[in-house]
Structures are given as structure tokens and as C-alpha cells.
Image (spheres, grey):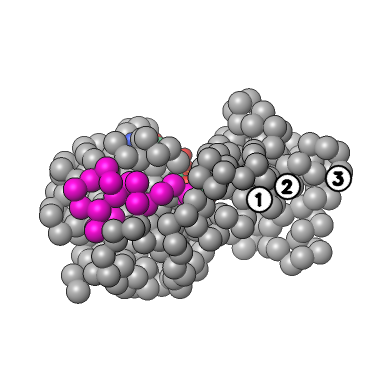
Amino acid sequence: MADIRSVGVVGGGQMGSGIAQLAAVHGLEVWLHDSDAGVLTRAHQSISSRIQRLVSKGNLTKEKGAEAIRNLRCTSTLDDFCSVDIVIEAIVESEEVKKNLFAQLDKIVKSSAILASNTSSISITRLGSATNRSSQVIGMHFMNPPPVMKLVEIIRGANTSDKTFNTTKVLAERLGKKIICSQDFSGFVVNRILMPMINEAFHALYTGVASKEDIDAGMKLGTNHPMGPLELADHIGLDVCLSILKVLHSGLGDNKYTPCPLLVQYVDAGRLGKKKGVGVYTYGKTRDEIKPSARL
Ligand SMILES: NC(=O)c1ccc[n+]([C@@H]2O[C@H](COP(=O)([O-])OP(=O)(O)OC[C@H]3O[C@@H](n4cnc5c(N)ncnc54)[C@H](O)[C@@H]3O)[C@@H](O)[C@H]2O)c1
């Protein structure tokens, strides 16, 4: 089985920067690319400071921390991915944008390289069809934040080979993750179950069943969830939740996945969650402030 030594990560947002950090800390060479140069600069700064924090807390030796930072290279050109063994894509949740990227990567990376997507919901089979290497295309769905959360959901497209699956599984385990496997149907397992719950929480808020605080407290204290569904939606990003619900709705053809109008309105208003400082809750020095969960 091919040994993965170098990883290309596309997308330096919440997920891509976390995946790049995780791979660098586990001794892999990492190339990180984002189409937005500002995002790339901020991603490098935040990954470096998170690694320094791991060192100062004693979770990583000084040498390993320095090595991890050396392992990470940011690039504004995808051509630098020509030598990587695997690419993990973590860009916007749009099938068209991802397909264009996969077609481009297919021409740049070496013939043995695997193209993995961190998509939350989009068909791996269709992403594979945008390339000439569909047997080497796979879903590698990390949870947020990738350095902390224990799970990676692996999704095989219709043409994904056993070799690609086994190499991806070994990589996820090397990164310290437990894996689950899912068939390639919209939303896979985790979001097929999670997103209807988040959508229902929005309906409960929209129709005045309870306040946002009571909806979240109800699910935390009543069902032992570490975060309430609205708090979790803010953490994921309301734009990401809406995109996933649209994929579930169109892919599975059931109206039960129709996004709640309140979720749509928040996204239209730019209230995208924690990353924008405002979503269901407002983050900052206001009465509405909620503290980041200790668990995530
Ligand atoms: N947010 C979550 O909790 C979560 C969890 C698991 C999986 N995901 C999935 O991970 C992916 C990324 O989500 P995120 O929350 O990190 O989003 P994000 O908005 O934080 O980051 C996306 C990044 O992709 C970049 N980008 C967009 N198009 C690009 C292109 N063509 N080439 C290069 N860079 C491009 C953007 O500049 C942005 O920095 C999505 O597919 C999402 O569904 C998200």
C-alpha cells in the first residue's frame, strides 16, 4: 500500500486549516492552498499559534512543534501540488466549484495521487466523474474542528478502488482518528441525521415554540448533547448548513429536508455564525455572548 508522506490541502477556512494543522503535527509534509491570499496568511498565523499553544500546554514537545511548523507550506498556486501523495479538498460546499477544482487537480497531481474531498454532503461519485481517475477519488469527511474531533467518515464513490479506500483509512488512523464508512448518498451518515435536527431547531425558533436559549438548553441538558443544535449550527456555519440541506433536499427528493425559512433569511442577511461574529447568537462583548464550548 502506498505510504502517504505529503498532503495538499485546498481551502484554508475552518476545516482546511484544521486538517493542515493535524497533518503537519503528525509529521506529514503539507501544502496549503486557498484562492484568497488573505485567508492563506491568516490560516498560517492561526495554525502556528495553535501549534505554539499545544507546545506551551505540554501536549507537543518544542521540537515536534517546530517540526510541524516547518512541515507546513502555504502556496497561492496549485502547481505546487505536483508532488503530493493525496489532496484533501475543503473549499466551499458547491458541487460546481468542487468539480472544477477536481478537474484542475487531476491535471496537476501525479498519476498515483488520491483526490479526497471533505465535503459534508456532495456526491463523491460525481466529483470522481469530473476527473480521469475516479478509482482514486474518495470522501474523507473530518469533523469540526479537525484536530480535536475523533471521527473521520470515509465515503466510497461508485468507482473508488479498495486500494484508495485502504490508503485513506490508514492515513485517517495515522492522524489519530476513528473511522466510519458510508455509502455515497447525499449527506452520508452524520449530516443525514444531524442536519434535519438542526433544521427542526430552526423551525422551533421560527414558529416561537421556544427561545434559542431554551432550545439549546433542552437538547444539552435533556438529551446530553455537548452543544445545542443552534449553537452547533453557528459553529458549523449557517451557510454550510444551508448548502447541506439543499443537497439533501435535491439528492433525496424529500420535502422534509426543505431548509427552514429562518435559516435561509439568516444566510441572506450574512449572519453565517461564529466565523462572522453573528448567526443565531452574537459573539463578542454583548449580552448575547455565548462562550465557546469546552468540548469543541
Ligand atoms: N464547517 C464545518 O463544520 C464542516 C464540517 C465538516 C465538513 N465541512 C465541509 O468542509 C468544506 C469547507 O468548509 P469550511 O467550514 O471550512 O468553509 P470556510 O468557508 O471556512 O472555508 C472555505 C475556504 O475555501 C476557499 N475557497 C473557495 N473556493 C475555492 C477554490 N476554488 N479554490 C481554493 N480555495 C477556495 C475560501 O476562500 C475559504 O477560505 C465544505 O465542503 C464543508 O461542507 C465543513
Residues at badges 1 and 2 in contact (C-beta under 8 Å)? yes
Q: Do we see residue 51 in this rendering? A: no
Q: Is residue 78 magenta?
A: no
Q: Which residue is mark 3?
A: 210
Residue stretch in magenta:
120-137
Question: Which is more toward the observer, 73 or 4?
Answer: 4
Q: Earlier in the sequence, mark 1 or mark 3?
A: 1
Give x and y (percent) for residue 40.
Answer: 34, 39
Give x and y (percent) for residue 77.
Answer: 21, 37
Q: Do we see residue 295 in this rendering? A: yes
Give x and y (percent) for residue 8.
Answer: 26, 52
Give x and y (percent) for residue 128.
Answer: 29, 49
Q: Quadrant of residue 61?
A: bottom left
- Identify the mark at residue 200; answer none if there is no mark: 2
Nearer the viewer's eye, disc 1 or disc 3?
1
Alpha carbon distance from label 1 to label 2: 6 Å
Q: Quadrant of residue 206?
A: top right
Q: Residue at x 86, y 39 (%)?
A: 208
> Mark 1: which amino acid?
Pro
In this rendering, the answer to whether 242 lies above or below 70 is: above
Alpha carbon distance from label 3 to label 2: 12 Å
> Mark 2: which amino acid?
Glu
